[in-house]
Image (spheres, rainbow, N blue to C red):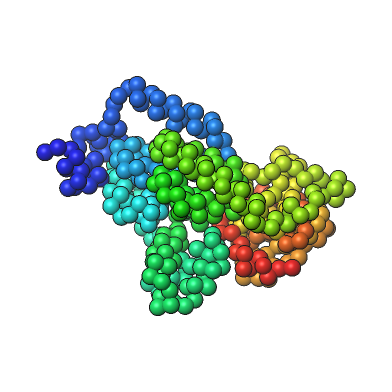
Amino acid sequence: MKLGTIMTMLGMGAVLAACDCCPQGEAKALSQDKELRAVMDNFTQNEVPAATPLVEKREVELIRLVSLVTQQSGALLQEEVATALAQGLAPEEILEAIYQCAPYTGFPRTVDAVEIARSVFKAKNVKVDESRATVTAQSRLEAGADAQGTLFGQTFRDMAKNGKSGMPTINYFLASNCFGDYYTRKGLDLNTRELLTMAILVNLGTEPQLKAHIGANLKIRTAEYVEQAIYNCLPYCGYPRTLNALRLLKESVAETKAGAVNVADAKSMPGKDWSVFPVGKPNDAYAKYFVGKSYLDMISTEQVGVGNVTFEPACRNNWHIHHAKKGGGQILIATAGRGYYQEWGKPAVELKPGDVVNIPAGVKHWHGAAPDSWFQHLAIEVPGEGGRNEWLEPVSDEDYGKLK
């Protein structure tokens, strides 16, 4: 019986688990052509990474995983899962990246990919946390609509208020299944899932849907970051689909500039006497964690990290938490303009020059500019044992719109 017939009957994962090409569960590409392998490795491991420095290594790895799932490349996916583990990705992150493919590629590709990933975990004795769902049958619609609304606007939340019977079937499925069953899961944050959705659609070449998700990414990432993320799909989807995606990105950027009122564009940049600290350079490295544009100038990187952050009007960072086993946290000192700070479950606090905010470790919060004013603060990282930042969902337009 031919291999293609076996693949059709048993599925990609079963074949890879059973065939001689994967001894002891170790990943090994079906094709061992040395010249093709050399070209592929040079392009994927050297040339593309060198051209896309903004995209974090973790996100590069996740984009590769979803690209291989979408392209149904079992052998290379098995290799990439092993590589992802070696680079420090948690098995839950790997599985969630694969799960995120299901509403866009369908269950067959996703199920086969999950089996491949689990075969690698088993061979390497990697344990997986199986409790990653956060919704129930009763909460999935509301939770999904909230995630959808965060990315695409309040209209989706309003639509879900009518319940299943008051919505078109496709809208109900999108809110409850596509967003409720997947975007709400633990293991990957909302912004990362949206980046991976864009990568999946680049690989599929579904242009109307891709353009919408490019637009969603542009709300939380710079155009340069989105462009470089698209280039990371190129080795897997080829040039035609990559060129189409870049065209859609260009169109989306132009439409955003033409159709949206940008408060910052309507006002001049602050003058040199606005603050004793410079505005700094575009904060591209963290742009995906901000709504709007910010600038960063590191005042100190020794002993204690002190960053001078400038926010354009209406710019704010996502909800986030500073974690530490001992000590840690952050101190904010407002230096110019007008802004806000808010802790989860508490009202927002207005910040003006001279105001100081002490943020203990473990507190979920956000900070940023007022809707009509530039804002600047010093962000002082409090030393702590095992300190790290956990970036969460963006501040919704609805909640931010309540500020003045």
Q: Is residue 68 above or below residue 268?
A: above
The total number of labels drawn is 0
Residue 83 % position (x, y): 40, 37
Residue 201 % position (x, y): 43, 49
| Residue that extends furthest to the right in the rendered view of this protein | 273
Left or right placement of residue 148 versus residue 315 in this view: left
Quadrant of image for the N terminus: top left
Which residue occupies 65% across, 57% down? Answer: 260
Left or right placement of residue 158 versus residue 267 in this view: left
Residue 134: name its quadrant: bottom left
Q: Is residue 92 above or below residue 84?
A: below
Left or right placement of residue 294 versus residue 4 in this view: right
Q: Nearer the viewer, residue 86 or 376?
A: 376
**Residue 94 in sight:** no
Residue 129 % position (x, y): 38, 55
Q: Is residue 61 above or below residue 191?
A: above
| Residue that extends furthest to the top in the rendered view of this protein | 35
Which residue occupies 75% across, 43% down? Answer: 280
Which residue occupies 23% across, 33% down? Answer: 21
Quadrant of image for the C terminus: bottom right
Which residue occupies 65% across, 51% down? Answer: 257
**Residue 354 in sight:** yes
| Residue that extends furthest to the left in the rendered view of this protein | 1
Left or right placement of residue 319 versus residue 274 in this view: left
Residue 170 % position (x, y): 39, 66
Q: Nearer the viewer, residue 321 or 47?
A: 47
